[in-house]
Image (tube, rainbow, N blue to C red):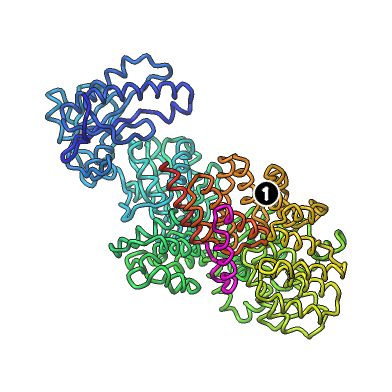
Amino acid sequence: MSLDTTPCGVVTFVFTDVEGSTRLWASDAAAMSASLEMHDDVLDETIRRHGGYVFTTAGDAFCVAFSDVTSAIDCARSIHDALSRAPWPGPALRVRIGIHRGESEQRNGDYFGPTVNTAARVASAGHGGQTILTDAVRAAAGPTVVDLGARRLRDVPEPIHLFQDGDGAFPRLRVLPDAMSSLPIPSTALVGREESIRIARSQLLHHRLVTVTGVGGSGKTRFALEVAERELAQLEHGAYFADLSSVSDEGGVARSIADAVRLGVAGGDPTSQILDYLADKHALVVLDNCEHVIDECAVFAEAMLSRRGRWRMVATSREFLDVDGEHIVQLPALGSSIDGPAVELFIDRASSVDPDFQPDAATRSTIATLCEHLDGIPLAIELAASRVTVMTPHEMLERIHDRFRLLSGGRRRARHRQSTLEAALDWSYELLSDEERSFFIALGVTAGPFDVALASTVSGVAPAEALELLDSLVAKSLVVIAREGTRTRFRFLETVREYALGHLRRVPNGLETARDLHLSHHLTTLGATVEAAEARHGSWVVWDWSTVTQWLSVIQNLEVAIDWAIACDRHADAAELLVGATPLWREQFAVQPILDRIELVAASLPTGSELRERLLIPQVQLAMVVNDLRGWKAFESASQQARDPTVREFRLVMAANSCSMTAPARSLEIEREAAEHGNDAFHFWDKNRADVYLFAGEYEQAVAALRSHQGENLWAVIDGTIAVALLMAGRADEALRVAKDHPMRESIRMSYGVIVGLCHLALGEIDDGRREVLNEARSAALGRMNLVANSALVGMAALVQADGRTDWAREIILGARCQREVAINALARDVADQLGVRDSFVAQQVEALSDMTANDRTEFLRSTLARYESSSASR
């Protein structure tokens, strides 16, 4: 017998689950796998024979719907009988079964509503070989049932009367009487912490103390409650919650724990009495908000761990307890992708205050950006979401610079210490020593990752002391470790940095002093790097790639130092930093702001000064990066005024590069003039000539122009341009050899992921090409630079074309704008040519150059990527 339609209306639900599956998998995974396969076969056949409809499975659990209650009970009995007689190839499996009946909502073959939830909880209360029934189905089971009484089930608001089918002997039910739990009932669902919950529960299987840490507002309390709730069914003696937030005197921790477990302490040592009481209990105690009584909590934890026992403890604290036997769960920031948990949390909380809140794709993208600025901190996201009745997400994003005022409202009934984002951080700040506070706020002048040396300089303490203080701030969840290869750096969440900076502004001359020290540090360290490059390579603008990557990790700090120098009219210092960091700027995601700084500083320096002339070198390079085609005549004219041959050469190179797309013949003439100076140490004119050849369709000449320089230049652009030229010449196999494992593959100066992906596609290696293109697109979709998004769109167009969706591929390539690198722009035009839209594409590129803001295609890339992944999943 089988069902032709899914049951609806009043439905009988049968939930099954294998007892002890976690232990069986851990002891012998291969044997367990074989037994589970037999288990699945037995249940499939038995359920089908009794007319059941399997609407979902999860691991080893079956969720089945029946129209007829008698068939459901007969099916459960048959399952137990069949499993008891099965010739198991591995361990013999026993299942627990729960049966409940009631109204439910059926959509697309799945079921929703409290009846379904109750059936699941009924099943989890039993043991292997046991079937638990509710009063709603008891009558159909006949006289052979055992009354188990009214019991409290997790996530079921009222006690429910349970019965056992048959008179078998089993251990006590996995339920919790009301008197055996003091867990508060959460008012909201937990969003986006499933992996951390899995880790915490796994640790509780093997360890007695797990401490949950994270920055203020990361949701430690709600997380610990969720872990305890999910453990509840396994705990014979319950779960208890001790809130330490109001404890202010010695002995308060032990008294709070005694109150939580409902133990009356008449006198003597309360810790010993608690440990004696819990010694034989299979229970869980949640110790919440430990950070302000950390020493007393540590003493209690050590006493607990020194005794044997089955009971366990979960502590929440912004600082771990630092005792032997403690295991840490660090709550990370919620991911802020468009479909990530941060956005899901925002929408969930916003919908609770505005039921009509239904964001479209553009609004979801704005929410994702907002959540990223809020560091993925759940409290900050919830407070922002509570504002949707008076502000749109776009308006919130516009006011993110004043985040503490923006997020000062929210839940009126929340405890004061966490009712606002600033109050949550006040709680941590007030627990610091005076020395830690001074150090903490001085670090507010940093931006992005920083090392011990910078922390030492801006705070005015010795490096060894700075390291100790950083270690303390990391332990207190105020500073984050940001390891990069063999180097350890530190950083603030932006929200915490703004908080520290706010305190620093209140110190007389504190901000100015710290910023001066910050600037001095970068002048010294960058100067040493430039001197080393000069000694090693004979040029201050050629750095080893390892040196480039080291500085790229702290480039935000360098930019802050430059901005402070400009603000203080220390333009010579700003110029030294701008010139010295020339190799870094071409690797930046946001080039235009650097160009703006260069132009501002250059205008403030004396005409004809050596420093102003040197400043023109990074200006030329960055203008080429952004393809500033509008200014090529001005650059050509300015070259005639330059006295220094190198400066004149660079100005000519800028002019030639700027008109390579629109006037390739004129570009080549300017190149020849630049070559007469013969002073190009970096092969600028050969690279530019290759770009001109690419636009002219002379691909072999482009390869020839650069072949002699392959591998000798430290820039990514030389070999990348060779690979592009080879690919466009139809020599994809050679192009792949050049690009695939290039040592500068991660440089954003050249979109190697797109090049490698298109090489694979050209060779018919579709899966490899798809992997490369999608990886590049996912990275670019983070929105760190719009020109990188444009390059990823070129790859997506080629991929969609390879999938046979030509019309959509044309839409994608025409949605791209100017590329970061000239050679990639030529490659984009080649893809457009293959799709038959070359003229439209070129016209669009030239038009886009008149308005560089139109180049931001990140949102278009995100929607394209989402559409591709969705359509691929359904194909």
In the rendered image, the quadrant that contains the C terminus is top left
| For residue 194, above or below residue 852 | above
Q: Residue 416, image x and y in percent?
A: 39, 67
Q: Residue at coordinates 52% horizontally, 55% vertically from top-left?
A: 319
Q: Is residue 778 visible?
A: no
In the rendered image, the quadrant that contains the N terminus is top left
Q: Residue at coordinates 16% horizontally, 26% vertically from top-left?
A: 145
Q: Residue 831, image x and y in percent?
A: 59, 54
| For residue 474, above or below residue 82 | below
Q: From the viewer's side, name the closer residue of 422 and 731.
A: 731
Q: From the viewer's side, name the closer residue of 865 and 571.
A: 865
| For residue 109, above or below residue 147 | below
How would you classify the magenta stretch by its main secondary structure? helix
Q: For the magenta stretch, what is the residue range?
A: 832-857
Q: Can you tell which quarter of the image residue 684 is in?
A: bottom right
Give the number of callouts: 1
Q: Residue 243, image x and y in percent?
A: 38, 55
Q: Is residue 116 visible?
A: yes
Which secondary structure lies at badge 1? Answer: helix
**Horizontal placement of 42 versus 509: left or right?**
left
The local crowd at label 1, few if under 14, some if 14 to 19, many if 20 or more residues have their Cα within 10 Å, is many
Q: Residue 826, image x and y in percent?
A: 65, 59
Q: From the viewer's side, name the closer residue of 592 and 9.
A: 592
Q: Can you tell which quarter of the image residue 619 is in?
A: bottom right
Say if the magenta span includes residue 841: yes
Type of residue at label 1? Leu
**Horizontal placement of 217 versus 39: left or right?**
right
Say if the magenta span includes residue 71: no
Report which residue position mark 1 lands on: 727
